Image: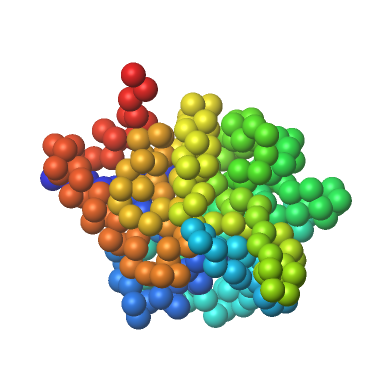
Amino acid sequence: MIDLRVQIGKFIFPTPVFVASGTFGYGEEASAIADLARIGAIITKSISPEPRVGNPSPRLFETTAGLLNSIGLQNVGVEAFVAEKLPFLRRVAVPIIVNVVGKVSDDFVRVVERLEDEDGITGYELNLSCPNVKEGGLEFSQTAQAAAALTIAVRRRTKRLLMPKLTPNVTNVAEIAMAVEGAGADAISLINTLTGMAVDIETWKPRINTVIGGYSGPAIKPVALAKVYQVAAAVRVPIVGIGGITCWQDAVEFFLVGAHAVQVGTTNFINPRTAIEIAGGLHDYLAQRGLSNLRELTGQMKTT
């Protein structure tokens, strides 16, 4: 028997393949295409205290091996999420993790406090790449102190799964990871997008309205693998790897360097069934190798 279940914190997920925030909407959008009950977890589109309209267009641009985006965390806000999105998610037999965003620490706290009395939610992913306006726009994940302070503030409000999402755009991501682990995180997800840009050589204008945006897709996988490997050596909490995962072979690499689960992101725009297909591929891979579960694979990369 092959067991694909994975435990993260106190929670057991049916498969280790989740769908990443911002790439799968609120779940219902893909329900006619993909069997949501076969996904390890749905991580919702970001939720803030109030609705956000996001950045003006153009805010997406496809590059040779990835995607530039500057959506601006557009979302319906926590009240509309509870009233309009959560009822559908409750009917889906899959763990739901809400991605939480804000401009100041209190924004994250407000969202979590509002959701605590609502059932159907497994936990929260904290988007630490949000600009902290109180600190002059410096991202929450740029310093260990800021990342830890935000994690502590939310940890005090919930016993649900708490998973800060870290940016790769720092000098020492392991230092940030250790800080949020010490602040009470149950798990750590990484990486968020790299910073990137593109220019139209005909108009001489940037391809996206904000000039610089977030870069995701297959091109960032080597960076993501390196960050997961570095963090896995520094912390004991489970790691959920993200970045350029398009197939089960990519996922295996992440498990070998120390990830306990993975998130499929940009590839969902091409094939919303990717997470399901990856889980199937992992099952077959374990069977072929004579392995019964992912614990026999996680962190087992050979360096000699």
Residue at left 21%, top 50%? 283
| Residue 9 percent coordinates (x, y) | 45, 41
Is residue 115 in view? no
> How is the rendered protein coloured?
rainbow
| Residue 219 percent coordinates (x, y) | 49, 52
| Camera-nearest residue between 6 and 116 | 6
In the figure, is residue 68 to the left or right of 28? right
Above or below: residue 280 compared with residue 189: below
Residue at left 47%, top 33%? 229
Q: How many marks?
A: 0
Residue at left 56%, top 40%? 185
Q: Quadrant of the N terminus?
A: top left
Q: Quadrant of residue 80?
A: bottom right
Q: Quadrant of the C terminus?
A: top left
In the figure, is residue 70 to the left or right of 99? right
In the figure, is residue 300 to the left or right of 290? right
Above or below: residue 200 compared with residue 161: below
Residue at the front extreme of this rendering: 202
| Residue 231 percent coordinates (x, y) | 53, 33
Residue at left 35%, top 60%? 275
Is residue 265 in view? yes
| Camera-nearest residue between 83 and 208 | 208
| Camera-nearest residue between 78 and 22 | 22
| Camera-nearest residue between 149 and 55 | 55
Q: Quadrant of residue 104?
A: bottom right
| Residue 20 percent coordinates (x, y) | 48, 59
